[in-house]
Image (spheres, grey):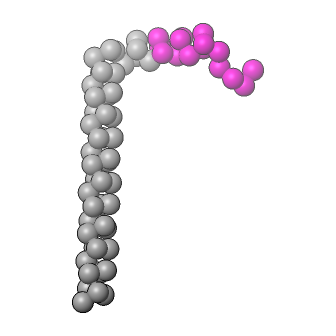
Amino acid sequence: MGMMSIWHWAILLLVVALVFGTGKLKNLGKDLGTAISGFKAGLKEENNQNSDLTVSKHEGQKE
């Protein structure tokens, strides 16, 4: 009773599509994908900056 069957998910998807329309859902998916890509790029940039700082600290200690 606690789990939703495939039919529950299908009806829920149909209701969401009827309420929001397929065009709006398509735009929502596109915006979500863009946001996730931007988040991943930000994480990579932060990791690169942190690794540059770590390298700089180690180089300063060697000299």
**Which residue of the protein is positioned furthest toward the front in this rendering?**
62
Question: Viewer-proximal residue, 1 or 55?
Answer: 55
Q: Magenta stretch?
A: 1-15
Which quarter of the figure has residue 4?
A: top right
Q: Residue at x 26, y 57 (%)?
A: 45
Q: Residue at x 40, y 14 (%)?
A: 17
Helix, strand or loop: magenta stretch? helix
Quadrant showing the N terminus: top right
Quadrant showing the C terminus: bottom left
Which quarter of the figure has residue 49?
A: bottom left
Which quarter of the figure has residue 18?
A: top left
Question: Viewer-proximal residue, 8 or 54?
Answer: 54
- The spot of residue 54 in percent (x, y) is 32, 74
**Which residue of the protein is positioned furthest toward the bottom in this rendering?**
63
Q: Is residue 31 above or below residue 11?
A: below
Question: Viewer-proximal residue, 12 or 60?
Answer: 60
In the image, residue 13 lies in the stretch drawn in magenta: yes
Q: Is residue 58 above or below residue 37?
A: below
Q: Residue at x 31, y 67 (%)?
A: 50
- The spot of residue 58 in percent (x, y) is 31, 80
Q: How many marks?
A: 0
Q: Is residue 48 above or below residue 24?
A: below
**Residue 28 in the figure: left or right of residue 7:** left
- The spot of residue 3 in percent (x, y) is 69, 23
**Residue 15 in the figure: left or right of residue 21:** right
